[in-house]
Image: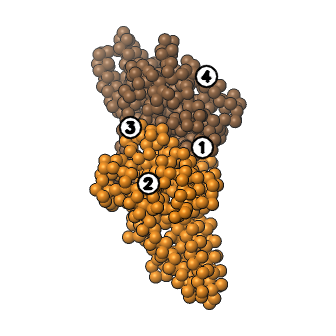
Chain colours: A orange, B brown
């Protein structure tokens, strides 16, 4: 089962807001519906957003009645502008849009443009799985049997098309017969760790223990953690990494306890146009996500709440970045751009 | 309004599990009912637990039909043993029991023993408020107008009889006209920060912003925090401090960002019988507190969960301990034991 897929003229995706209670698919007929699914975080995770964005354009192309290529391009650009407004931190979403738009633009005719968009969206999905498996291969050597790995949020199959990035490395090590176990932070406010990471790992049979985000320091202090693996939403040229809020705290605690801290991500997550993490735009989400749990208000009415979706971990706290092209020092990302 | 009070032959307390939705009082007729209220965390906070424990014995004495002092003492000891089994980390609970039992034992007759228990329970409550105000006086000088203070969990009026420890310092500074604002961590799993600290501060008119526990590092990194004030459940002779899970992570992050980290507690929280934090017993609470939010399961069935209620912050990360007897270096607690 894939996290998100192009089926006929629809985008079909696992509704991640309903897990682990219910595994339900939803169908999006057009870019607007895909955009809403992204906003509601029914689909999330940087690599999955690349595919979601591309597929939003693919269904636009498939259902378009445009008679000329320029009409089609106009429709695609309108759809892309809608999707661009959904979430601003994960660079992959913008890469997904650009690749599909470029493919349309390069095509010689309306029909060829239409099929180029669909082909590019499918290609992004196929590449994702291939890249994740390569990342897993590369990263698995960092783990040895008996290791306990801390992960934050969900950088798994559900954050990608399949297999995952940080969880892909764990999966690869596990499949090689290494006995890995995982500590997953619940990841407030939306609990992707408790809900999604625990669900994925349990399905795979990999032992997993859930903790609240506040327990991370205590687990390090008790020497329960051998290494940290997290995903990334955008990596600046200098190695500074934006990832789910809470990642930075974990990186500081890992350093304090001399535990290696790895960022695991496809090279498409590196944004060479940004010199440092300071330039990465950080999405602020609604106060309600923190102030309510389900329908129950937990913060008194009228009290202010912060809800940045991401924080930035400086390169100096990152032991290495694991990509499909190898494991690199965060200060040496330039070496990847040439490949 | 007091957090917990002896009224007639009952213990009346604010049900803290219902805040901020509803301010409701509950009445406990005997030690068993007080013990259950403690277990359910309807009353919590180390100083409040000293009073709750003493009041549990007071209602036992008030309702006892014992004809001899030794009968009464036996009933009181039975009640004390029940209360002892509720929560094991906060030393104050044990101090509260010991003080009331000692008072009964020292009395010359059954009737005098009965009234001695009640008097001692009331004295513990009165002392608590007096001590907290003194702590507030002492600590207020650490804060200057414009400061933003980070606090964790609830070390406020609701964790004591009234006024609070860490929040008492903030209250004292505020009442002196210093413009303080507070960032309160929500404090998973039971959300005492979001529910109780925010409620208390809002009632007092002190500006407060709630964040998830995972946002602490990001707030430090953005230089939003001038100092950290937290309470304590037990302080060992060397200054190591047990407090709500998550405190240790905050202490490491405060040190990383060179922000002072203060523990605020009455001297009765210092346990000179324990040389270091390693000896402090840590309560493990039920997995359900993490796995469910309200009635909604957030961790897949069958997945393991950790739930230590406290962690230990080593003395080296504590800038100073603020007590009613002064502000002391955590390495110099012995200076307080002589007073």
Q: Which mark is residue B221?
A: 1
Mark 2 or mark 3, earlier in chain: 2
Find the residue positioned furthest to the top: B108
In front: B194, or B9? Answer: B194
Q: CA distance from mark 1 to mark 2?
A: 23 Å
Location of residue A79 (image quadrant): bottom right
Residue that badge 3 annotates: A222
The residue lying at 49 percent from left, 72 percent from top is A124
Circle 4 residue: B138
Residue under label 2: A193
Against B2, is A122 above or below? Answer: below
- Local crowd size for mark 3, using a 10 Å CA cut-off: few (<14), some (14–19), many (≥20): few
The disc numbered 3 marks a residue on which chain? Answer: A
Whether tag 1 and tag 2 are in contact, CB under 8 A, the answer is: no
- Nearer the observer, B214 or B108: B214
Nearer to me, B8 or B319: B319
Q: Secondary structure at mark 3?
A: loop
């Amino acid at each position: 089962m894939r996290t998100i897929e192009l089926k006929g003229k629809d985008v079909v995706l696992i509704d991640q807001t309903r897990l682990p209670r219910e595994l339900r698919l939803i169908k999006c007929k057009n870019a607007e519906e895909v955009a809403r699914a992204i906003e509601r975080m029914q689909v999330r995770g940087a690599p999955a957003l690349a595919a979601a964005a591309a597929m939003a354009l693919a269904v636009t192309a498939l259902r378009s009645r445009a008679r000329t290529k320029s009409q089609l391009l106009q429709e695609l650009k309108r759809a892309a502008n809608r999707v661009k407004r959904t979430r601003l931190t994960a660079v992959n979403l913008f890469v997904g849009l650009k690749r599909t738009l470029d493919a349309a633009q390069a095509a010689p005719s309306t029909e060829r443009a239409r099929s180029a968009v669909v082909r590019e969206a499918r290609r992004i999905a196929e590449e994702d799985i291939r890249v994740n498996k390569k990342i897993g291969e590369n990263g698995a050597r960092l783990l040895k049997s008996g290791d306990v790995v801390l992960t934050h949020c969900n950088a798994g199959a559900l954050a990608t098309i399949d297999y995952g990035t940080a969880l892909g490395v764990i999966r690869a090590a596990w499949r090689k017969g290494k006995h890995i176990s995982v500590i997953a932070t619940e990841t407030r406010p939306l609990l992707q760790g408790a809900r999604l990471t625990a669900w994925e790992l349990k399905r795979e049979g990999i032992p997993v223990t859930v903790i609240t985000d506040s327990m991370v320091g205590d687990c390090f202090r008790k020497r329960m953690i051998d290494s940290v693996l997290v995903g990334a939403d955008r990596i600046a040229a200098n190695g500074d990494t934006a990832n789910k809020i809470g990642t930075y705290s974990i990186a500081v605690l890992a350093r304090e306890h001399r535990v290696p801290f790895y960022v695991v991500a496809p090279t498409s997550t590196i944004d060479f146009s940004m010199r440092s993490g300071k330039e990465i735009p950080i999405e602020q989400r609604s106060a309600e996500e923190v102030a309510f749990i389900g329908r129950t208000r937990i913060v008194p009415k009228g009290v202010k709440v912060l809800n940045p979706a991401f924080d930035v971990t400086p390169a100096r706290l990152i032991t290495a970045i694991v990509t499909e092209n190898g494991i690199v020092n965060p200060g040496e990302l330039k070496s990847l751009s040439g490949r």
